[in-house]
Amino acid sequence: MTIDSIRNGIVIDHITAGKSMEIYHILELSKLDCSVAIIKNASSKKAGKKDIIKIDSQLDINMDILGYIDPTITVNIVKDGKIVEKKHMELPDHIDGVIKCKNPRCISSIEQEIVHSFKLVDRENGIYRCVYCETKAEPETL
Amino acid sequence: MKKDLIGITDLSKEELAELIAIAEKIIEDPVAYSEKCKGKKLATCFFEPSTRTRLSFEAAMLELGGSVLGFSEANSSSAAKGESVADTARTISCYADIIAMRHPKEGAPMVAAQAAPIPIINAGDGGHNHPTQTLTDLLTIYREKGRLSDLKIGFCGDLKFGRTVHSLIQAMSRYEGISFVLISPEELCVPEYIKKDVLDGKNIPYVETSSWDELPELDILYMTRVQRERFFNEADYMRLKDAFILTADRLQDAKPDLCIMHPLPRVNEIERAVDEDPRACYFKQALYGKYIRMALILKLLGVE
Ligand SMILES: [Zn+2]
């Protein structure tokens, strides 16, 4: 399988195998009109298998969300066919408007206009809590 | 920058010590504080009724020479017409200098604090935080024992749903030489996250038991009510509610300087005969609650 290398765009590499579609949805890549390639189960020296997403456009993507979903990811910025920047993910201190608080007693579950907001409370274990009610973010809340 | 009080952990140990020191000065010389908040207004915004807490706040402001306004249930507020917490807080900020807010939804006072330009005090948000209760408990312990360290503290009753218990465990865990005895029926024991994150996380010694065997060792005994609404069926409630009652008889073996606390209201978990025992501190606790709220109002308003 070959996919043309992109000249100007972004390569999201080292995605944990199987997670590419989740990232595709979260980053709302379906809304783009440039070409987007999703490569599943590519062979990886480090992890055996990995997913890759190539986007043929220089858009701003939300690195914080990527860091939360899959900290193993690296993001390569490609210009004129060359990788000009390689970004490693880090767990963001805050995640706003992405994860929803699941606590039905939380004010952010009641009032529509409140932006759901989570704070990193334990970097080592990647634990986030709702800033309003302190309920732990569960991975399936994405 | 304005300061709010949303959770007890918003306050550092130093800030807690400062509030306790202010409260002690007020207790020593209340007259000196009787006009400190003259011309200032406290709004008590109670989206659910809690007469006890509301009166404590109002008494605190009145004793500082300030005035109070507010509402005591959601029916009489704009929330009944569907106004957001943020809008309510912003509007009330035009009429008052500080707000004490009670709300059935967790996190509502935090939303208010983000929206309002004046200080917000969380007066209880659902089962989440109730920091002025914890401040009350800390002042009581300090006044009665003269210290916040080197204490063996027993909690008895509903330790599962009792947020005052969780929050006091959290607050006391910051001091040296603290250990806990957690007395409850198995069904109502302290939740796992408190044990794991707070107690084990800080290597704090604790015992879980459903007997009174440890009572003679305790410096403080914190009693709580087993609430009917926590149970799905009446039979479970009836079986458990009387299991952990403190009687005058049981107290015979306790230390002579034990401090017995209870957040009130009490149902029957402390026998009336105990009220006459000098070790019973729960009514004094309500009084300390007023003094620490006075200290808090002064601090948040920046009044010296
Ligand atoms: Zn929440």
Image: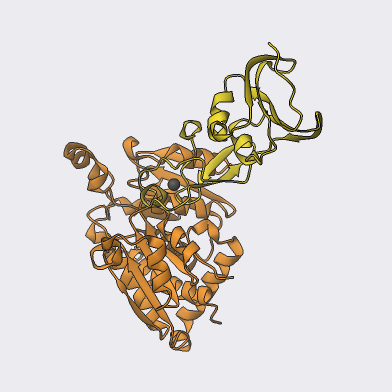
**Quadrant housing the N terminus of chain B:** bottom right
Q: Which quarter of the figure has residue B53? A: bottom left
Its colouring scheme is: by chain
Check the image and report above or below for B248 versus A116: below
Q: The chain drawn orange is chain what?
A: B
Residue lying furthest top in this view?
A: A1
**Quadrant housing the C terminus of chain B:** bottom right
Residue lying furthest front in this view?
A: A33
Q: The chain drawn yellow is chain what?
A: A
Q: Which quarter of the figure has residue A88? A: top right
Please tell me which residue lies in front, B41 or B282: B41
Using residue B203 as the reference point, say whether residue B112 is left or right of it. left
What residue do we see at 55% from left, 65% from top? B16
Using residue B205 as the reference point, say whether residue A56 is left or right of it. right
Number of numbered callouts drawn: 0
Q: Residue B147's x, y, as percent?
A: 54, 63
Q: Residue B216's x, y, as percent?
A: 41, 49
Please tell me which residue lies in front, A112 or B155: A112
Please tell me which residue lies in front, B285 or B22: B22
Check the image and report above or below for A27 versus B119: above
Q: Residue A138's x, y, as percent?
A: 48, 34
What residue do we see at 50% from left, 77% from top? B298
Check the image and report above or below for B197 versus B41: above
What residue do we see at 59% from left, 53% from top? B176
| Viewer can see residue B128 | no
Q: Residue B266's x, y, as percent?
A: 26, 58
What residue do we see at 43% from left, 56% from top? B220
| Viewer can see residue B238 | yes
